[in-house]
Amino acid sequence: MEQPKEFVKKGKENLVYRLKRSLYGMKQAPCQWYKKFDSFMLDHGFKRISANHYVYIKRDECFNFIILLLYVDDM
């Protein structure tokens, strides 16, 4: 990785930037995506089942169910 030419400062030409989040295509990206997705689902009232962490369930007061299955990055 190289610094963009517009941001190179004298005496710091050989420094690189530290990324604050994962980029698409990096090996950490799928894990970070799942963490973000999981926290979103839990914040919206869904629960993960213990047998499979890719299955989310939400039940309303009329006992209707929403079941969401996650396969790779398709729902």
Image (tube, helix red, strand yellow):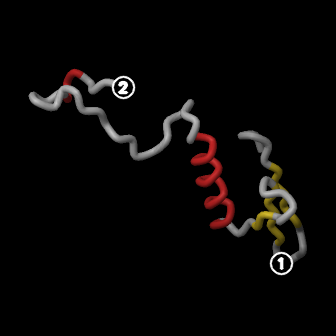
Residue type, label 2: Met
Q: Quadrant of residue 41?
A: bottom right
In front of the other: 75 or 36: 36
Instruction: Identify the residue under disc 2.
Output: 1
Crowd tier of the residue under label 1, counting other residues whose Cα lies within 10 Å: few below 14, some 14–19, many 20 or above: few
Where residue 66 appears, as percent x and y from the top left, is 84, 61
Q: Is residue 10 left or right of residue 3?
A: left
Q: Is residue 12 left or right of residue 49?
A: left
Question: First in sequence: mark 2 or mark 1?
Answer: 2
Name above or below for residue 16 compared with residue 18. above
Where residue 11 appears, as percent x and y from the top left, is 10, 30
Crowd tier of the residue under label 2, counting other residues whose Cα lies within 10 Å: few below 14, some 14–19, many 20 or above: few
Instruction: Identify the residue under disc 1.
Output: 61
Name above or below for residue 39 compared with residue 70. below
Give the residue drawn at x 79%, y 53%.
54
Give the residue furthest to the left: 10
Name above or below for residue 56 compared with residue 15. below
> Element at badge 1?
loop
Q: Is residue 56 left or right of residue 1?
A: right
Give the residue drawn at x 54%, y 33%.
26
Name above or below for residue 70 compared with residue 8. below
Give the residue drawn at x 71%, y 40%.
73
Residue type, label 1: Glu
